[in-house]
Image (spheres, rainbow, N blue to C red):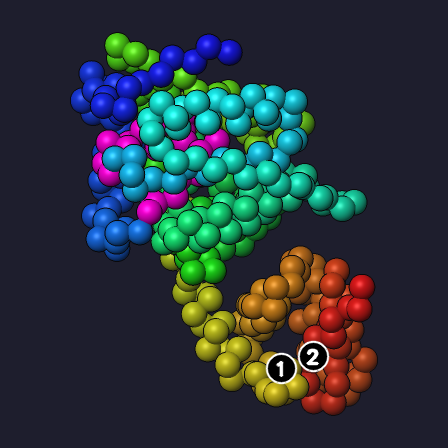
Amino acid sequence: MHLPTVPSSTPAAQSSPALPALAALRSFLQRHAALGAAAAPVAIAFSGGADSTALLQGALQLWGPERLRALHVHHGLQSDADAFADHVRKRCAAWNVACSVLPVQVRAQRGDSLEDRARDARYQALGEAARGLGCDWLLLGHQADDQAESLLLALLRGAGPKGLAAMPEAAQRDGLWLGRPLLACSADELRRSLDVGVQPLPYLRDPMNQDPAFRRSRIRHELLPIIARLEPGWRSTLGRSAALCAQAATSLEETAAQDLARCTSEEGLRLDTLRELSDARLSEVLRLWLLRAGLRSSHGQIDNLRQQVRATANGAMDLQVRLRSATLERRGVSLVRVVSAD
């Protein structure tokens, strides 16, 4: 595959005076001044697709190549994975940007979503690599279309406010800031910015984005065109809904954290204090308690657990809910977690 290169002295098609990714990055810096003030290198998740290419292009114009570290995850799930990695290396070499290709293995158990497992493995590899390079920030190329798709996916799963909040613009995870500067940019405008100019920039097209086996792909190609006809401003409208859900989720979690502190004892959670809470607040406390322990729970499991906690007021002694890696049960006056041996 022949890929045209851009000399490092002209990092990003200077004939395009208004690059949307560059404008989005500058706006992002106004809201997150710590990124602009820091001297640490900045990691860019670089898949080689249009969005991450536009992001790296904008970051290159903003900071120059010396501060950037491009990270590419090679999970081997596609036959073209090696070619993707080669493309990324060549693009970074043309721009004099340091590049690391991160091989990962995706292990999905029966009943797991391969897409979810691949995402988890990708974030883990990117985070470990960014921290290892001394980066405070890892920037991701998610844009407005991705945000809308994430919101619709969460809605179809029956998610609550936290799930409907979709992807935050900035969040800290294990000491590393994850930033998504392009959430106000559409996929079309990012692609157009790469296609125009004296020397258009090549980018990869992921065949998984066209595969109807993946629900996100069907939302993108079948549902969003219908929504676009009903609501031309769907990107900003759905983005605003996600932002409002994020605010609601933050408020719920703050209240749950206060309730959890009141209910916590050395053994676990005090059942009598749990029973004082309304159903909604009790559910949020249980969900947060499990989340902080690294345990995943479904809506049905939380409902079951809440009902069993309520039943202890009437003398019920048996209380047990099994999760994948732990069992929740009653011990005396407390609800405790028992981690599975396997």
Seen in the picture, residue 133 relative to 118 is either above or below; the reply is: below
Callouts 2 and 1 close, C-beta under 8 Å: yes
Seen in the picture, residue 49 relative to 268 is either above or below; the reply is: above
Indicate the quadrant where residue 315 lies: bottom right
Q: Amino acid at mark 1?
A: Leu
Residue stretch rendered in magenta on the structure: 41-63
Q: Of the numbered discs in the image, which one, if any, rests on residue 91? A: none
Seen in the picture, residue 33 relative to 262 is either above or below; the reply is: above
Question: Measuring 58% from the left and 71% from the top, which residue is drawn there?
Answer: 289
Q: Quick one: 13 or 21, which is closer to the camera?
A: 13
Q: Secondary structure at mark 2?
A: strand
Q: Quick one: 289 or 129, which is closer to the camera?
A: 129
Question: Which is the main secondary structure of the residues drawn in magenta?
Answer: helix
3D distance between C-alphas at marks 2 and 1: 7 Å
Question: Measuring 46% from the left and 27% from the top, which residue is drawn there?
Answer: 89
Residue 269: x %, y % from top left: 62, 82
On-image quarter of the C terminus: bottom right
Determine if residue 63 is in view. Answer: yes
Q: Does residue 225 appear left or right of residue 53 in this picture? A: right
Residue 324: x %, y % from top left: 75, 60
Indicate the quadrant where residue 110 lies: top right
Q: Does residue 61 appear left or right of residue 313 in this picture? A: left
Q: Is residue 339 magenta?
A: no
Residue 290: x %, y % from top left: 62, 68
Q: Quick one: 127 or 89, which is closer to the camera?
A: 89
Q: Of the numbered discs in the image, which one, if any, rests on residue 269? A: 1
Q: Which residue is mark 2?
A: 336
Q: Secondary structure at mark 1?
A: strand
